[in-house]
Amino acid sequence: MKTFTLEELTDNYIGKKGTEKREEFDNELRLDLIGYEIKKARKERNLTQQQLGELVGVKKAQISKIENSATDARFSTILKVFKVLGAKVTFDVELNDHKLAY
């Protein structure tokens, strides 16, 4: 029986890196992971979605949407959530093959 790596399967069924379909898939996966980590951190701090929303200044429904990746939340809202949860946020930006470090 032949086995395949996750990368091979993703290349075969979604598309190779750099293709539009693969970029969309990778972006959705990142949003799912961010939502999962926010939910995990909120629960570790014994906060309800309502309480976290109040601390951030948004409604419970917005926190639910972020945690379940049901919507493209505003970047500023996600940063506020991370701040309230005490997360250290770093990211890389690449523009026209030039990496901008922040």
Image: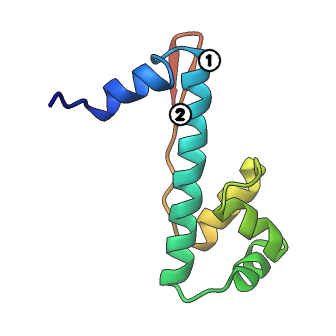
- Amino acid type of the residue tagged 1 in the rendering: Glu
Q: Position of residue 26 (x, y in %)?
A: 53, 34
Q: CA distance from mark 2 to mark 1?
A: 10 Å
The correct choice, above or below, for 55 with respect to 20 in the image is below
The correct choice, above or below, for 9 with respect to 29 in the image is above
Label 1, residues with CA under 10 Å away: few <14, some 14-19, many ≥20: few
The correct choice, above or below, for 83 with respect to 70 in the image is below
Quarter-wise, where is residue 39 in the image?
Answer: bottom right
Quarter-wise, where is residue 28 in the image?
Answer: top right
Disc 2, SS: helix
**Which residue is the extreme one toward the front?**
1
Q: Position of residue 81 (x, y in %)?
A: 66, 66
Q: Earlier in the sequence, mark 2 or mark 1?
A: 1
Quadrant in which the N terminus is drawn: top left
Q: Position of residue 95 (x, y in %)?
A: 60, 17
Q: Residue at x 76, y 83 (%)?
A: 50
- 31 vs 41, left or right, is right
In the foreground, 63 or 83:
63
- Amino acid type of the residue tagged 2 in the rendering: Asp
Name the residue beneath numbered marker 1. Answer: 20
Q: Residue at x 55, y 89 (%)?
A: 46
Name the residue beneath numbered marker 2. Answer: 26
In the foreground, 73 or 80:
73
Q: Residue at x 49, y 19 (%)?
A: 15
Mark sitting on residue 89 = none
Disc 1, SS: helix
